[in-house]
Image (spheres, rainbow, N blue to C red):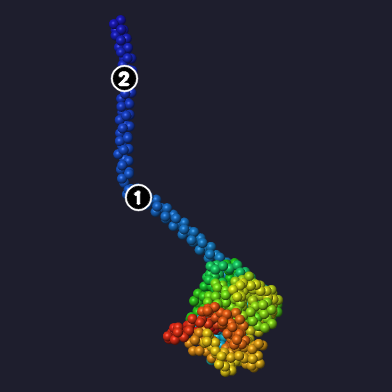
C-alpha cells in the first residue's frame, strides 16, 4: 500500500509538475521569442542607418540602371534612324527605277556657232555666261569649241509618249543641226524638233522609235519647300546619273533667264549635261524640267532651277497640238515698288508692282488700268515682282477673264480684263526726243522742261495726242538727277496726274504734300518707268561729296 501510495503520490507529483514545466517552457519560449524580436528590431535599427548613409552604394545601383536604360534607348533610336534611312533609300531607288527607262541623253551637232558662242569665247551653243549658266552641255574636256568644224553638245530629255515624243530644254537643241537620242539600253535614234518655246525654255522632239516607256507628269503645285526630289541626267556626259536633294524654294521669278519664269529651286546636284532632264518626286513623276544653275565655276553650287511640270506640260501639249504656244496678253508695263514708292502712290505698306505704261487699246486700258496703279493681286494670286505678274498672265490662255486688284489714290479698286493673245516679244525702239530750248524750269525737281506738240512728239517717235513734256536740262546733283532723270526723257506723269503741259506739271507739283517723295513717270526709248524724286535730297545734302549721293546703278530690264 505504501508503495502503491507512494507510487500514486509519485505519479500524482509527476502529473502536478508537468503543467508547471509546460508553463515554465512556455515562459522560456516567450522570453526567447521576446529576445529574438528585440534582437531582430535592433538589427533593423542598426541596418537602417547603414542603408541611409550609403549614397555610393545607391548611386552605383542607380547609375547601372540608368546606363542600361540609356544604352537600350540609344540602340532603339539608332535602329529607328536606320529604319528611316533604309526607307528613304528605298524611296530613292524606287523613283530612279521608275523614271530611268524614260530618261534619254541628247547629243547635238551645230554646224554654225551661235553669236552668243562667239561672244563668249566659242563656248558650246546655248551656254550662258558664268553666274547663271544653263547646265546643257559638257564643259571639260571640251570647254572651248574647236576653231573649225561643228560644235557638239550634250543634254538630257525625257520620253513622254510611247510613240517617241521627248521633252527637253529649248537651249539644248535650239541651235542644233543634228540631234541624236541615246536611250537607257544604249539604243540610238535621230530626232527632229517639233517645237521650241524660248519663253519657258521648253522644247519638244520626236523620234521614229516606238514601244517606249513614257514618264508621267506629276503635279508641281502640290510640292512644298523641303520635299525630297531626284534629278536624272547626263552631267558631263555621264549618262543616267541620279542625284537627290530637296525643294529649296518655289515660284522663283526675275532670275533673268527666260521671259516667263516660275522656277522650282533645288539643291539636287545639277551640272552641265543635266539640262532638259527631269526633276522628279519620290513617286518617279516629273515635277520639273531642269533648265539652269547658278554657278561661279560652271559646276554645281547647290542652286538649280527647274521649270515646274504645271508649266512644262501645258507648253508641251500646246506644241504637240498646234506647234506653238498661245499666251494671254494684258498690255501693261510694270516695275517693282519699294516702300517709298508705294507710300508716294498712296499705298503705304502695300506690296506689289507699279503700272508705268498702258498700251492704247489693250485689255488693260479697256479694263480701266492707268499708270500709277499699284497692282497687288492678279487672278487671286498675290503679286510681289514684275516676273510674277508676267508669268501669271503668260500662263493663261487668250480670252481668259482676269480679276485684278490695285491701289489708286490710296484706295483699293477691282478691275476685270479679258486677255488678248500675246504677240512677238520683239520691241520697236523709238528715237529719243530732242527737246526744243525753253526757259521754263521746275525748280522743285531741278528740271528744265519743254512742251512738245503732238506733231513734234510724233516726229520723234513719241505717242502724245495731247502733247508731251520733254526734259531739256537736269540740274547737276539736284533731286531729279539723283532719281535718274536724264535730258531727252519724256515726263508722262507727276504724282497721280498726267502731264502734257508745263501748267499741268506745276499743278501736279502743287498738289503734292510738302516734303513728300514725288513719283515721276519717265519714258525713255519707248519704255516707261516711275522714278522717285525726293525733294529732301537737295544740293545741300548731295553737294558734300559724290560718295554721299544715292547710288544710281541702272537696273537691267529682264
Residue beneath the point at 64% across and 91% down? 453
Whether residue 238 is visible to the viewer of this picture, yes or no, is no
Residue beneath the point at 60% across and 90% down? 451
Neighbour tally class for label 1: few under 14, some 14-19, many 20 plus, Cα within 10 Å: few
Q: Nearer the viewer, residue 332 or 136?
A: 332
Q: Nearer the viewer, residue 548 or 336?
A: 548
Q: Earlier in the sequence, mark 1 or mark 2?
A: 2
Residue beneath the point at 56% across and 90% down? 440
Disc 1 and disc 2: Cα gap in Å?
A: 55 Å
Residue 285: x and y in percent read: 61, 69
Quarter the C terminus occupies:
bottom right
Q: Which mark is residue 21?
A: 2
Give left or right: position of 464 versus 520: right
- Relative to 358, residue 459 above or below: below
- Relative to 83, residue 39 above or below: above
- Residue at the disc numbered 1: 59
Whether residue 445 is visible to the viewer of this picture, yes or no, is yes
Q: Secondary structure at mark 1?
A: helix
Residue 41: x and y in percent read: 32, 35
Residue 240 placement: quadrant: bottom right
Amino acid at each position: 500500500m505504501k508503495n502503491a501510495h507512494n507510487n500514486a503520490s509519485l505519479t500524482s507529483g509527476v502529473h502536478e509538475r508537468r503543467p508547471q514545466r509546460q508553463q515554465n517552457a512556455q515562459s522560456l519560449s516567450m522570453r526567447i521569442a521576446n529576445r529574438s524580436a528585440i534582437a531582430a528590431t535592433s538589427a533593423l535599427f542598426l541596418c537602417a542607418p547603414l542603408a541611409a548613409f550609403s549614397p555610393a552604394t545607391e548611386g552605383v545601383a542607380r547609375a547601372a540602371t540608368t546606363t542600361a536604360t540609356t544604352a537600350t534607348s540609344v540602340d532603339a533610336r539608332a535602329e529607328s534612324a536606320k529604319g528611316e534611312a533604309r526607307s528613304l533609300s528605298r524611296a530613292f531607288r524606287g523613283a530612279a527605277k521608275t523614271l530611268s527607262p524614260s530618261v534619254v541623253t541628247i547629243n547635238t551637232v551645230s554646224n554654225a556657232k551661235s553669236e552668243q558662242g562667239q561672244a563668249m569665247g566659242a563656248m558650246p551653243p546655248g551656254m550662258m555666261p558664268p553666274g547663271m549658266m544653263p547646265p546643257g552641255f559638257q564643259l571639260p574636256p571640251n570647254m572651248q569649241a574647236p576653231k573649225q568644224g561643228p560644235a557638239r553638245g550634250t543634254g538630257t530629255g525625257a520620253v513622254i509618249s510611247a510613240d517617241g515624243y521627248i521633252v527637253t530644254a529649248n537651249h539644248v537643241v535650239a541651235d542644233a543641226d543634228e540631234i541624236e537620242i541615246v536611250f537607257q539600253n544604249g539604243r540610238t535614234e535621230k530626232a527632229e524638233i517639233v517645237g521650241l518655246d524660248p519663253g519657258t525654255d521648253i522644247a519638244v522632239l520626236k523620234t521614229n522609235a516606238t514601244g517606249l516607256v513614257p514618264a508621267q507628269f506629276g503635279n508641281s503645285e502640290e510640292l512644298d519647300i523641303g520635299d525630297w526630289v531626284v534629278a536624272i541626267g547626263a552631267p558631263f556626259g555621264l549618262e543616267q546619273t541620279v542625284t537627290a536633294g530637296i525643294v529649296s524654294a518655289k515660284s522663283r521669278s526675275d532670275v533673268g533667264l527666260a521671259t516667263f519664269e516660275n522656277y522650282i529651286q533645288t539643291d539636287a546636284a545639277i551640272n552641265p549635261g543635266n539640262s532638259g532632264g527631269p526633276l522628279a518626286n519620290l513617286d518617279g513623276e516629273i515635277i520639273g524640267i531642269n533648265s539652269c544653275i547658278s554657278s561661279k565655276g560652271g559646276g554645281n553650287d547647290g542652286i538649280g532651277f527647274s521649270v515646274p511640270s504645271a508649266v512644262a506640260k501645258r507648253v508641251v501639249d500646246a506644241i504637240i497640238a498646234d506647234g506653238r504656244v498661245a499666251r494671254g496678253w494684258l498690255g501693261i508695263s510694270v516695275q517693282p515698288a519699294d516702300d517709298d514708292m508705294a507710300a508716294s502712290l498712296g499705298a503705304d505698306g502695300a506690296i506689289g508692282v507699279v503700272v508705268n505704261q498702258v498700251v492704247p487699246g489693250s485689255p488693260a486700258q479697256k479694263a480701266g488700268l492707268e499708270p500709277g496703279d499699284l497692282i497687288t493681286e492678279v487672278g487671286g494670286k498675290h503679286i510681289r515682282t514684275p516676273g510674277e505678274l508676267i508669268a501669271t498672265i503668260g500662263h493663261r490662255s487668250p480670252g481668259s477673264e482676269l480679276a485684278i486688284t490695285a491701289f489708286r489714290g490710296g484706295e483699293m479698286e477691282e478691275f476685270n480684263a479679258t486677255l488678248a493673245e500675246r504677240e512677238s516679244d520683239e520691241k520697236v525702239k523709238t528715237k529719243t526726243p530732242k527737246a526744243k530750248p525753253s526757259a521754263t524750269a521746275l525748280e522743285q525737281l531741278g528740271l528744265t522742261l519743254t512742251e512738245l506738240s503732238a506733231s513734234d512728239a510724233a516726229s520723234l517717235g513719241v505717242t502724245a495726242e495731247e502733247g508731251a513734256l520733254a526734259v531739256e536740262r537736269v540740274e547737276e546733283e539736284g533731286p531729279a538727277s539723283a532719281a535718274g532723270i536724264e535730258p531727252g526723257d519724256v515726263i508722262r506723269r507727276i504724282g497721280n496726274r498726267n502731264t502734257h503741259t508745263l501748267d499741268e506739271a506745276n499743278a501736279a507739283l502743287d498738289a503734292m504734300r510738302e516734303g513728300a517723295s514725288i513719283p515721276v513717270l519717265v519714258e525713255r526709248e519707248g519704255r516707261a518707268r516711275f522714278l522717285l524724286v525726293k525733294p529732301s535730297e537737295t544740293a545741300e545734302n548731295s553737294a558734300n561729296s559724290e560718295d554721299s549721293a544715292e547710288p544710281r546703278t541702272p537696273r537691267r530690264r529682264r
